[in-house]
Image (cartoon, rainbow, N blue to C red):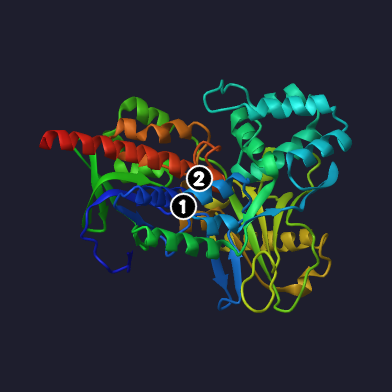
Amino acid sequence: MLYKAKDKITKSYDTIIIGSGLAGMTAANRLAKLGRKVLLLEAHNKLGGFATWFYRANKKHVFDISLHGFPVGMKKTCRKYWNKEIADHIIQLKDVRFINPQYQIQSEFTREDFTKKLTENFKVSLEQVNAFYNYIEHMNFYDDQQMTNRELFEKFFPGRDDIVRFLMEPIVYANGSTLDDPAISYGIVFSNFMKKGVYTFKGGTDHLIKMMQDELLKNDVDIKKHAKINKIVIEQGRVTGVMLKDDFIPSKTVLSNANLKSTIFQMIGENEFSSEYIEKAKNVRLNSSSCQVYIGIKPGEKIDHIGDLIFTSSYPKFDTKALLAKNITSRTFSVYYPEGRPYDKTPKYAIVSSTNANWEDWANLSDEDYESEKETMIQETIKALENFIPDIRDKIDFIDAATPRTIKKYTHHQNGASFGTKFEGLEVSMNMHQELPGMFHAGSVGIIMSGWLGAANYGVIQANEVESYLYKNDQQHMQVLV
C-alpha cells in the first residue's frame, strides 16, 4: 500500500529499504517477488533518487535531472526484474557528438562505430584497437586493481591524449572517474556501453518512476514518502528495525540505499562495527558532484536536431581537473525532443546542460555570491549553446540552475556527491552485512556500481544477499520449532 505522510505504520517486515534510488526500488521489487514483506521508505516526495524530474512554471515545463544514458543491459535488467513494458520503453540514442579543440566527431557510441573512428579519424591500427577492447572486456572485480586509467591508456595508446579524451570523457560524465582511479572503474563501464550503444527511457523519468511505483504496489510493497528515518536500531549486535520520528518499525533486515558514509556514521554509529571496518569506511572518498542548467523552450517553438548528447569543451586537451573546475570549459548537453520526451499535447523541447563539479567550490559561498555564480553559469551556458542554436535566447521560456548544494538538499548525499563514493567504497558496502548481521547496503558506490544500470544491478545483488540471510534465519527458526 502507499502510505500517506501522516499515516502510522504498525506492521513488521522482512526487510525495510531506506531510500528509493534505482538500487533501492529494484531490491524492493526483487524481494517482494520472492514473497518477502517489504517496506520502502523515501525522505523525498517522490521515488527515484537521482532518477527523477521536476516541473516548473505551473507544470508548463518538465525536466529530467541531469543526463541519463545507460548501456543496453538496462533492457535485460528491467525485463527480468521489473516488467516487459518498462524494458520496451528503453530506446537507443544514435546521435552522440564530441566537439572540442582536438576533434569534432559524431558517433552511434557502439563498438563498431568507435572502432571505425579510432582507425579512420585517429589512425590507430585495427589490431591495436581490438587488443584494447579485448583487454577491458575481460576485466572483472576480482582482477588486480593496481593499474590506473592513466596506465591503461598509456599501455594501448601511448602519448595520445586525443584518444584518451575520446574514450574517457563520456565515462567521466557517467561516473566521475579520473585518470588516477583504478582501470577497472573505467573498463567495466566502457565495455558495457560499447556493446550496443547508449540508451535512454522514452517518455521521461516521471513516466518510468510511475511505472515502477505501480509495479511495486502490484507486488505488495508498502511505500511511504516524506519518511526520513532517525536511526537504524541495533540490539545485541543485530538489526531489529528503524526509528521513523518517534515510531519504531520492526524488521528482520534493513537495506540502506542512502549514502554509504551517512548510513554507517549517522544512521547506525561506528560503535556497532569493528575498528578495522570503521577505518576502511573513514578512508572511503566521496565522489565528485555536478551542476546543471535547465532550459525550457517556448511552447510552439522548434529547434533543429543538433544531436542527442553533445560532449563539448573549449579546453585544449583532456583534463579531469578542468572538467571539475567552477570556471566551466566542458559541458554535456542532453537534448529532449518531443518524440523522445513527450509531455503534453503541445510539442515541447528541453535542454539540460550538465557539468562535473567540486563541492568545495560551492559549499561556503554567501547567499549573494551563490546567486551571482549561478547566474554566471546560466549566461555562459547560453553562450556555449549559441554555437549550436544561434537564436536560442529568443526561444527560451524558462531557465534555472542546480549546483552541488542543490543535490545535497534533495538527496541528502554528503558533499552533494553525484556518484556516491570512489572505488574503495564497494568493498565496504558489500561487506556491511558481514560486520552487522541483517544490515545491508546498495547504492552508488565504487564507480562501477553507479549509473542507472549499475545501481539497478547492485540492488539485485544485495536483494539476493538479503534473501539468503532471511532464508537461513527461517531454516534455523524451523529447526528450533522442530
Which label was assigned to residue 472? none
> Which of 152/363 is in front?
152
Who's the residue at 72% across and 60% down the image? 381
Q: Is residue 263 left or right of residue 480?
A: right
* Amino acid type, callout 2: Ala
Asked whether residue 322 appears in the rendered view, the answer is no
Q: Position of residue 47 (x, y in %)?
A: 45, 60
Looking at the image, residue 125 lies above or below residue 196? above
Secondary-structure class at tag 2:
helix
Q: Is residue 240 left or right of residue 169?
A: left
* Mark 1 crowdedness (10 Å alpha carbons): few <14, some 14-19, many ≥20: many
* Amino acid type, callout 1: Gly
Who's the residue at 11% across and 37% down the image? 481
Who's the residue at 37% across and 57% down the image? 219
Q: Quadrant of the C terminus?
A: top left
User: How much space separates mark 1 and mark 2, taking CA atoms?
Assistant: 8 Å
Q: Are marks 1 and 2 in contact (CB under 8 Å)?
A: yes
User: Mark 1 or mark 2: which comes first in sequence?
Assistant: 1
Q: Which residue is mark 2?
A: 455
Q: Quadrant of the N terminus?
A: bottom left
Q: Position of residue 387 (x, y in %)?
A: 83, 59
> Which of 70/267 is in front?
70
Q: Which residue is mark 1?
A: 21
Q: Is residue 391 left or right of residue 292?
A: right
Secondary-structure class at tag 1:
loop
* Mark 2 crowdedness (10 Å alpha carbons): few <14, some 14-19, many ≥20: many
